[in-house]
């Protein structure tokens, strides 16, 4: 059975027609968004240093629980900053332009195989990690329920827990769908139908 010849890809540097060139060039409109996220990350650095200074200044007066809450807040800032890095670097590489980091000693390991699907899963896992830190802080502060020393209520703690589990279920759903899609693409490349049955 003869297969239809594949359409050759246009060579690099090919001149596009005006309309495709405008459409393809519109991806650069995302550049200010990524620059804005870099500025937001700088704000988080300032926030981290402020919280760290606050912790050092009260190291001898804070209780163990207060120190733990501040440290969890610092970890929360770091995880959000990691999320920003993934969105900035991975999103720019995927949707705007190549960074050409091949061979660079500081190239992130995950960037070599990043695509929209991988980025979605990594973002979902990062969000779950951030939610876990928030939930842990809530549980620690919830130990003061009934004493008037916390802003949390039993209903608020319950809803935070429910939302956290919804994040987990969403991440599992995304990973499951992406695994099915990857299997279908692999079967298509091998010349097999998506349902796994051999072609007649």
Image (cartoon, rainbow, N blue to C red):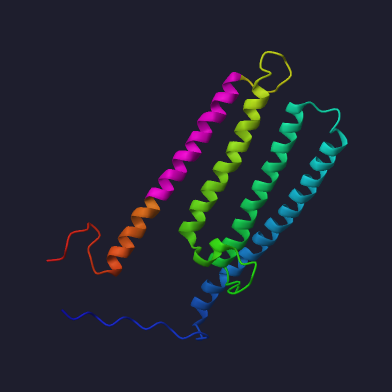
The question of residue 65 being in magenta is answered with no
> Would you identify the image quadrant in which residue 141 lies?
top right
Membership of 163 in magenta stretch: yes
* Residue drawn 59% across the image and 25% down it: 157
Q: Position of residue 80 (x, y in %)?
A: 65, 47
**Residue 133 drawn at (x, y percent):** 62, 37
Point out the residue furthest to the top here: 146
- The quadrant of the image that shows the C terminus is bottom left
Q: How many labels does the image show?
A: 0
What residue is shown at x 67% (from left), y 42% (from top)? Answer: 76
Magenta stretch secondary structure, dominant = helix
Residue 121 as seen in the image, left or right of residue 67: left
Residue drawn at (79%, 40%) of the image: 51
Q: Is residue 6 left or right of residue 50?
A: left
> In the figure, 81 relative to 188: above or below?
above
Residue 132 position in % (x across, y down) = 58, 37
Front residue of 41/113: it is 113
Toward the left, the furthest residue is 200
**What stretch of residues is rendered in magenta?**
154-176
Residue at (61% x, 63% y) in the render = 30
Decide: is 8 above or below 184. Answer: below
* Quadrant (top left/top right/bottom left/bottom right) for the N terminus: bottom left
Is 144 drawn above or below residue 1 in the view shown?
above
Indicate the position of residue 18 as horizontal and vertical percent values.
Answer: 52, 81
Note whether 9 is above or below 153 in the view shown. Answer: below
């Amino acid at each position: 059975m003869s297969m239809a010849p594949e359409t050759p890809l246009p060579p690099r540097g090919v001149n596009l027609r005006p309309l495709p060139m405008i459409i393809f060039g519109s991806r650069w409109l995302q550049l200010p968004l990524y620059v804005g996220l870099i500025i937001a990350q700088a704000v988080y650095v300032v926030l981290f240093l402020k919280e760290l200074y606050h912790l050092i200044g009260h190291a001898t007066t804070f209780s163990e629980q207060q120190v733990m809450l501040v440290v969890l807040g610092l970890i929360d800032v770091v995880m959000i900053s990691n999320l920003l890095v993934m969105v900035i670097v991975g999103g720019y590489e995927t949707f705007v332009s190549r960074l050409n980091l091949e061979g660079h000693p500081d190239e992130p390991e995950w960037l070599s195989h990043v695509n929209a699907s991988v980025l979605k899963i990594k973002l979902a896992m990062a969000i779950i990690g951030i939610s876990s830190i928030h939930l842990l802080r809530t549980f620690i502060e919830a130990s003061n329920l009934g004493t008037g020393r916390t802003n949390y209520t039993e209903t608020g703690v319950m809803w935070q827990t429910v939302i956290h589990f919804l994040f987990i279920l969403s991440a599992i759903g995304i990973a499951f769908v992406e695994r099915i899609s990857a299997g279908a693409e692999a079967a298509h490349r091998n010349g097999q139908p998506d349902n796994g049955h051999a072609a007649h």
